[in-house]
Amino acid sequence: MGSNQNNQLGVPSIPNPPGITNNVTVIPIPFDANETITTASAGYRGTLVATSSGKAYGFGANTDNELSIPFNPVTTPTLIKAPADSFGAPSLIAQVSIAKSSSFVVNTLG
């Protein structure tokens, strides 16, 4: 609930403007039924979530590439490509954090 002016709720169907809702909305995120969200972070114009399988999804304005997704706006939850670990394997994301113009992830290696 709140402002969706920059698609930070991940629901493109809420009109913009005013794009404000007081309703709790279930946002479908495209992952397996056995997967759960382990952590989430809501920023000024975007949102990040991490899942139990170590994936990260982002949605929102992305005007400063704060979601590391090559387009903007990101209107629905979109998988973020995780950087490779030192062995070249995709790293597993354990935590996410987003601010106004930047974001951070912590992988399972720390």
Image: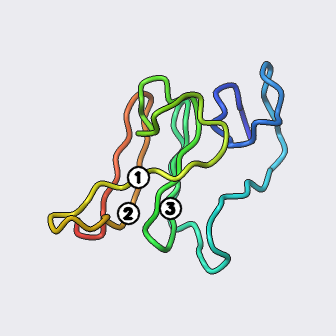
User: In the rendered structure, which amino acid carries the disc numbered 2?
Assistant: Ile
Which residue occupies the foreground of this view, 46 or 29? 29
Q: CA distance from mark 2 to mark 3?
A: 10 Å
Does residue 18 sit above or below 38 in this rendering?
above
- Badge 2 element: strand
Q: Viewed as shown, does residue 5 lie left or right of 105?
A: right
Q: Viewed as shown, does residue 99 lie left or right of 22?
A: left
Q: Residues within 10 Å of mark 2 (few under 14, many from 20)?
A: many
Does residue 38 sit above or below 40 in this rendering?
below
Q: Residues within 10 Å of mark 3 (few under 14, many from 20)?
A: some
Q: Nearer the viewer, mark 2 or mark 3?
A: 2
Q: Viewed as shown, does residue 55 lie left or right of 90?
A: right
Does residue 28 sit above or below 33 in this rendering?
above
For the N terminus, give its image quadrant: top right
The answer to which of marks 2 and 3 sits earlier in the sequence is 3
Given the current orientation, which residue lies at the most extreme front position? 88
Q: Viewed as shown, does residue 85 lie left or right of 96?
A: left
The answer to which of marks 1 and 3 sits earlier in the sequence is 3
Q: Find disc 2 in the rendering and name its residue.
A: 93
- Badge 3 element: strand
Query: What residue sits 29% from the left and 54% below the top?
Result: 83
Q: CA distance from mark 1 to mark 2?
A: 10 Å
- The reply to whether dot 2 and dot 3 touch (C-beta < 8 Å) is no
Q: Find disc 1 in the rendering and name its residue.
A: 81
User: In the rendered structure, which amino acid carries the disc numbered 1?
Assistant: Lys
Q: Find disc 3 in the rendering and name its residue.
A: 39
For the C terminus, give its image quadrant: bottom left
- The reply to whether dot 1 and dot 2 touch (C-beta < 8 Å) is no
